[in-house]
Structures are given as C-alpha cells and as structure tokens.
Amino acid sequence: MSIDKWLKQDKEEDSNKKVESIKKIQEQQLKEVINKKIEQLKREIKEKQPLRSDSDDFLSYFVEFRDWLNKRTYLKGDLDEIATWINNLYNKLNLIVSQNDDEDNDTEKLDLKKQYKKIPLSFLDDKTRIAINKIVYGQNRSNSDNYYVKKLNLEIQDKLKEAEYYHILKKILELKN
C-alpha cells in the first residue's frame, strides 16, 4: 500500500467521522427542537382547557345528589344521608359565596386606593394623611394615628351634615327656577 492510498484512507476516515459527528449533533438538536415543540403544545392545550370553577363542582355535586335521590324509593329510611348531602351542599355554597365576597373586597380595596390617590395633598394635614395611609396600606397604627383618624371621622360627620343642608338649599333653589 502506498503512502498516497494510506493518506487518502485517513482523509476519508476523518471526513466520515466528521459527517457522523455532524449527523449526531443534528439528531440531538432535532430531538431538542421536537421536545421543545411538544412542551409548547402541551402548555397551549392546558391554556385552552377551561378551568373548573367551584360553581361547576357545586353543580356536579348537586346533580349527583339529585341522581342519588331519584334512585331512592323509600326516603324515610334515608333521612340521615339526605341531611348529610344537604349539609355538604350548604357548606359548598357558603364557601363559593365567601370566595366571591373576598374577590369583591379585593377589587373594592383597589378602587379605594385609586380614589385615595386622587385626593390632593393639601386637602389633609400631614399627620392625618399618614394615619390614612396606614389604613389604606394595612400597616399598624399608633395611638396618635388612631387619634387623627377619630378626629377626621368627626370632621367628616360634621361636613356630611352640612352637605345635607346644602342639598336642601339646592332643592329650594331649583323650585324657584
């Protein structure tokens, strides 16, 4: 075997190794891309599926109770089980209502915070504003804060009484026109 043939074989082997390594790398990259695409599709499917709410669970539980009740022929013997079903339904309904109330309270708090930010700085004195900030943002209040809150509450009550008088006067003036 001549040196030229031997060198050609080495070059061919090197080129074959390079081709094989490139194929391996491409296969690995292809697998990675496929796995990423599968994960993305799984996430999209999860996002598209509607989430079951508590009210749906309650309705399914209620339908289950109705079906169970329809299968019974002698209800007098099942009074304890019926009472249990009704208690469970009542508890589930109370849980749903309390969760909805909590969500409503959260939105009301956010609305109040936005409205509070509309009040000009010069409208309240500094110490009263600090006390109100602590109430709005849920911080602990000191005794002086409580004092300023009570003072503001009394002032608000006085202003509301005055507002009633102004409202009556406004109605009187509207009658004149």
Image (tube, rainbow, N blue to C red):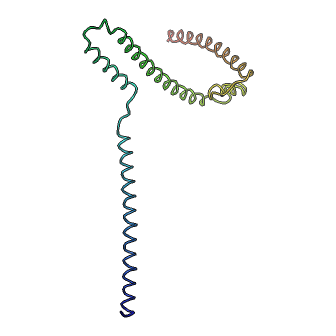
Q: Looking at the image, is 143 positioned above or below residue 43? A: above
Task: Indicate whether 7 appears above or below 139.
Answer: below
| Residue placed furthest toward the top | 76
Taking depth in this image into account, of 157 and 143 the one nearest to the observer is 143
Image height of 19 relative to 162, above or below: below
* Residue 67: percent from left, percent from top: 27, 18
Image check: 46 left or right of 172? left
Q: Quadrant of the N terminus?
A: bottom left
Quick one: 127 or 67, which is closer to the camera?
67
Q: Position of residue 2 (x, y in %)?
A: 37, 94
Q: Position of residue 22 (x, y in %)?
A: 39, 70
Q: Residue at x 64, y 30 (%)?
A: 120
Q: Quadrant of residue 73?
A: top left
Residue 80 image-quadrant placement: top left
* Residue drawn 40% across the image and 88% down it: 7
Q: Nearer the viewer, residue 137 or 75?
A: 75
- Determine whether, in the image, residue 122 is placed left or right of residue 106: right
